[in-house]
Amino acid sequence: MGILAEKYGEIYSLKMGFKKTVILTSMEAMKTIFTNEAAFGRDITGMSGDRILHKNIGIASSTGKMWEKTRTWTFRTLKDFGFGKSLDMECFIKTASQSLFADIDSKIETQSGVIEIDRYFNASILAIMWKMIVGRIIPEDEPNMEAISEKGHAFMRSGVLGMGIVNAYPFLRHIFPKTLGYTVQMDYFTTCNRVGKHLFLEMENELNSSQLTSHHNSLLEKFVQNYTAGNDPELFNCENFQLIFQDLLLGSTDTSATFMEIVVLYLIVYPAVQEKVYQEILRVSPNGRDISYSDRKE
């Protein structure tokens, strides 16, 4: 890429398959492009288009005013339910951690202390995001949460090679869907959409059978209440909620879980750091109480 940049400049294009791809080779080039409104568009062909039903919906793939409205409303509403607020997030994390720690204790006793951490943190992180979006975690939710966790993990492991090939030659996804990982990827998207639609319709029925109030318990409830009230149909509709639901889970769960796995690996590789962290925990919480955000000062 650097050699081509010397010949054609810091910004040039390559035709990869059926698509032209813009190559940026410096920070200055990135600033030039990403401050230009023409660069705000999204790829809605191939698998990317199939994911969003070939419509201008969701957070990650919408464009223009729709992107501005969806992104602004979603993150402003999430903040109302604790997203990014230390005390509220601490409550969510503690609740999700209880089952994680109990499972660790159980595995230590039954598996001679050996724990396979691949995907081990996904369920706890998914539970945190689910609670903020849906406002509850009940036994009936657990099969759906498990399905999303498993299929999301398979999606992330389906590989970038197949995605790259499909991006260059979109028609190949219909000829070699399994080989290119398209089947696994669409299985995850379909599962998220199915669960999201079920939650939307369930909340719609609940709101239609009860008196509307100004108090909301979740992003889902506030979204559906706007829908039933007829506010901004372009933003508040079932398909857009399905994509918002999908984007939030995909953008948070596997990324955070992978980070936690990296932290564990780091502590294993560097036992001196592991011991330092352990001693700091003993110093801050000698009686074994839960660590809180306020302990960062210590």
Image (spheres, grey):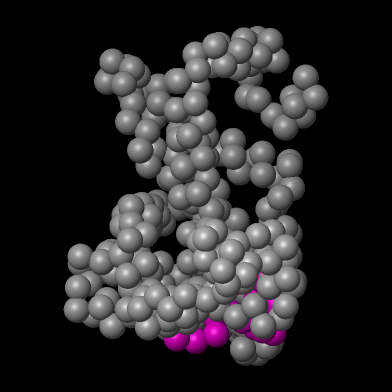
Residue at image point 45% right, 28% down: 265
Horizontal arrangement in the rendering, residue 119 relative to residue 271 (left or right): left
Is residue 258 depicted above or below 218 in this figure? above
Q: Is residue 103 visible?
A: yes
Q: Which residues are magenta?
A: 54-73
Above or below 142: residue 298: above
Query: Is residue 224 in view from this perspective?
Result: no
Please tell me which residue is depicted at 55% across the width and 48% down the height of the picture: 128
Viewer-proximal residue among 237 and 8: 8
Q: Residue furthest right?
A: 297
Residue 244 screen position, x and y as percent: 55, 70
Residue 190, by quadrant, is bottom left
Establish if 22 lies above or below 97: below
Q: Is residue 91 left or right of residue 2?
A: right
- Residue 168, x across and y down, in percent: 37, 76
| Lateral position of residue 159 relative to residue 27, left or right | left
| Number of on-image labels | 0
Residue 71 lies in magenta, yes or no? yes
Q: Which of the 4 image quadrants contains residue 292?
A: top right
| Residue at point 72%, 58% (across, down) | 79
